[in-house]
Amino acid sequence: MRWSNCVRLVALIAILSRAVAPAQDLGARQQEFMTSYRNLVELQDLRGIGRLASKDKQLTEDVLLQYSFRVVRSGADAANEVDLLITAADESEQGTRFRKRFDRFKPMDAEARGAWLEAWNAWAKASNIFAEATTKREQSEFRRALVEMTDALTAALKANDPEMAAMARYHVGYAQEQLGEYAEVIKAFDVAMDEWVAAGRPKEAMYQYMVDKRRELIDKGHDPLEAGKAEPGPKKNATTSYREGSAWVELETAYKEMKEPAQFASTTPWGVDNFLLWREFGWSDKKAHEFGVLVQAAPFGKPLKVFREGGKGWFDLDEDGKEGKADAIVKVIDGKPTLNSLKAGPAKDADRYAFYMLSGGQGQQWFGTLVNYQTSGRYRIGCYREVKVEGEPLVLIDDNCTGSIGDPSDQGDNIWRGNPRYIDNDALVVGKGKVAPWSDIVSIAGRWWNLKVVDPHAKKIRLRELDLTTGQVVVKWNGPVAPKVLAIGETEAMKGAYFDVAGGAPVTVPAGRYEIAYGRLEAGKPGQMKQAWIFKGESGAFDVKPGEVTTLDLGGPYTVDFKTEQRDKALVILPKTLLVKEKSGAIIGRIYDEIPYYEVAARKRGGGALGKPKAMSKISTETFNSDNSATWFPAEYVIDHAKEEETEIQLTLKKHSLLGGPITSEWK
C-alpha cells in the first residue's frame, strides 16, 4: 500500500496533533465514556464493552492514555479499573499494545516512572515540531524535527518503551526521507518495524508504509549493505545480496484456471480440502440484504460485491446496483464448488480472475450441529499464473484471495483471545515441488533468486540471482499429527522471505533470523477433517546459521490459560478466554471440530479439593444460535458457592486426538 503525499500528510498531522501531554483529569466526553463503561462492567456485558471500544477507537485510546498517566504518576495500579477496556481495545485494534503498555508499568519504580515521563515530554515536544514541518514542507524544518525526534527516540529507549520508540523511530525515518538520507531511512525502518511488533502494534498503514518504502529505496540502490556501510564482519544475507554479474530478468506469465479446487493445496491457514473452512461471503437475497461482499477479494481494484435475487446472482462490477453487460453471473450451487470466471476492462487486454464458490444449503453440519447455509457461501481462488524460469515451471497463486499476487498480509484472528497474529500468504510452486508459501526469495533450478511482481496480477515478474549462505531447519513435533504447513518468516534483512519447514526432514533456507509466521495441523479426509491453526504467540525468534541445522522443538506438552468471572455466589470459567500454547509458546487455535473439553478441578486456595473434577461440556443450541463464534469453545463452566479470592482452579486434558497431550493449566 502506498499513500499519496496528501493522504500521508493528513494522517501524520492527525496522529501528531494528539501527541500532547494529557490533563490529570478526564474531560467531559471521557467521563461520559467511563460512565458507560462502568455500567457495562456492572452488567457483565463483555460484548457491550467490545462495541463501546470499537465505536470510537480514538476516544478509547485517549481514555487509556489518561489511565497510563495515572499509573505512572502515582505508581498505583489504576489499570484494574480499565482492565476489560484494555482487552476490548486490543481486540478492536487487532493488536496487544495496550495490554503490553500497562504490563510494562506494573514493575516501575520511581526512577523508571520519571524516565517514562521525561520520554513522553520529549515525544510530545518533538511531535509538535514535526507537525509544523509537515505543514511548512521546508528542509530546515525537517532537519529541526529530525534532531528533536532523535532526542525523543533516545529518551524512549532509556525508558524501555518500545511503543514510543517505534513511533519516534518511524518519524526519524520519515524526516530522513524528506532530507534525502535514504540509506538512513532503510536503517531506521528496519529497526522500527521490529519495535513495532514488540510493542504489540498491528501492522497497519504506517507499518506497511515502512515495508513499501524500504523496498522501493533498496530497488533504487540505497541499501546501506550494498554501499559498504554495514559494520565489518561475516557476510550477511539480504534481499540485495545479488550474485556478481547478475541482472534483473523480466518475464511475462500466462493466466490459467484451475481444473478443480484441490489442484493445488493451500499454504494459508484457510484449509483447501474442507470447503466449510474456506472464506465466507454473504449470499442473502437482495430483498433481505443489499449485497454480499467477498471481503478479501478485490481483483479489479475494489471489493467484489455479490447481488442475489431468488436463484440468480451476479458480480456488480460496474457498481450500479443492477445486473448489466459489464457484470458477471455468479454460479453458486449448494455443496458443489463451481468456478466463477471474471473479466474486466477492454476485451483485448482484459484483467481476468476466477474463484471457486458454493453455498451450503440445508443439511450442513458445523461442529456437529445442523446449520442452514443458504444465506452464506464459501470461496477460494480458482486461477493462477505460470511461467518458465531456467527451464522449470513456476506457478504463482493468489492463495490469500485478495485479488493481488505476492502480497502477504499480517492478520489478527477474530476468535481467539488477544487476536493472535498470523501471515495470510500467497503461494508458489517450483517445478514438480509442493505448494510453498509466497516468498520474495525463492530457490529455482538449484539457485536462489529475488522475485518481484511488476503488477498486482503478476502478468509480469522480475527475477535476479542472489548469492546467499544457507543453513537448514528441521521440525521436531511432539504429537500424533505433525504440522501440514509450518511457515517461518525472516525478520531482518530478508523481510518478505517465507519458507515451509513442515514434514520432519531438514529444509534448506537462507541463513538469517526467523520466527514462526503461521502453520496448520490437519488430519482426516475433507469431510471429516480435524484442523488447528498455529499462531506465533510467544514463541521466540531463532537464528539459522550458515552450514548448520536448527531444530525447532515444538508440540506437547501443552499449557492452557483461562480467565474467570465472579457472578453472585458462583465462579464462572469464561470459555472464550481459553488459550492453548505448545511448548515454545506458539498458540494452537481454531481447533476444528474436536473441541478440548477439559476436566475442571477446584480447591480452596492452597487447601483441599472442592469435590471431584468434572469435564466441561458442549454449548447448547440456544447459545450457538445467539453467538456462532461460541461454537469454537466449550460451554461456560459454573462452580456454585465459590469466590475468586478463596478458590483455585486447574484445567487438564490427558489427550487430544489432533494435538496429543497432556494439556494442563496452572492452578489459578
Image: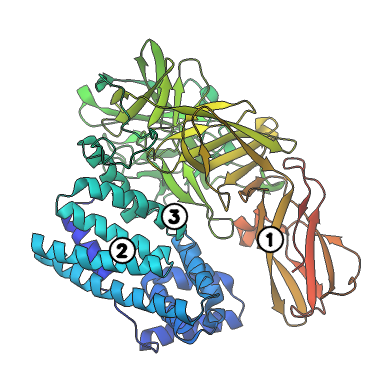
Q: Earlier along the polypeptide chain: callout 3 or callout 2?
A: 2
Q: Which color mode does the image show?
A: rainbow
Question: Mark 2: which secondary structure?
Answer: helix
Displayed quadrant of residue 170: bottom left
Tell me if 466 is positioned left or right of 100 in this view.
left
In the picture of the structure, the residue carrying the numbered disc 2 is 168
Q: Earlier along the polypeptide chain: callout 3 or callout 1?
A: 3
Question: Mark 3: which secondary structure?
Answer: helix
Q: Badge 1: how crowded within 10 Å, few (<14), some, or many (20+)? A: some
- The CA span between labels 3 and 1 is 23 Å
**Which one is closest to the eye, mark 3 or mark 2?**
2
The image quadrant where one finds the C terminus is: bottom right
Q: Badge 2: how crowded within 10 Å, few (<14), some, or many (20+)? A: many
Question: Mark 1: which secondary structure?
Answer: strand
* Marks 3,1: beta carbons within 8 A: no
Q: Is residue 102 above or below residue 471?
A: below
Tell me if 538 is positioned left or right of 27 in this view.
right
Displayed quadrant of residue 173: bottom left
In the picture of the structure, the residue carrying the numbered disc 3 is 197
Q: Nearer the viewer, residue 463 or 446?
A: 446
Q: Nearer the viewer, residue 288 or 388?
A: 388
In the picture of the structure, the residue carrying the numbered disc 1 is 561
Q: Residue at x 35, y 30 (%)?
A: 353
Q: Is residue 143 above or below residue 312?
A: below
Dot 1 amino acid type? Asp
- The CA span between labels 3 and 2 is 14 Å
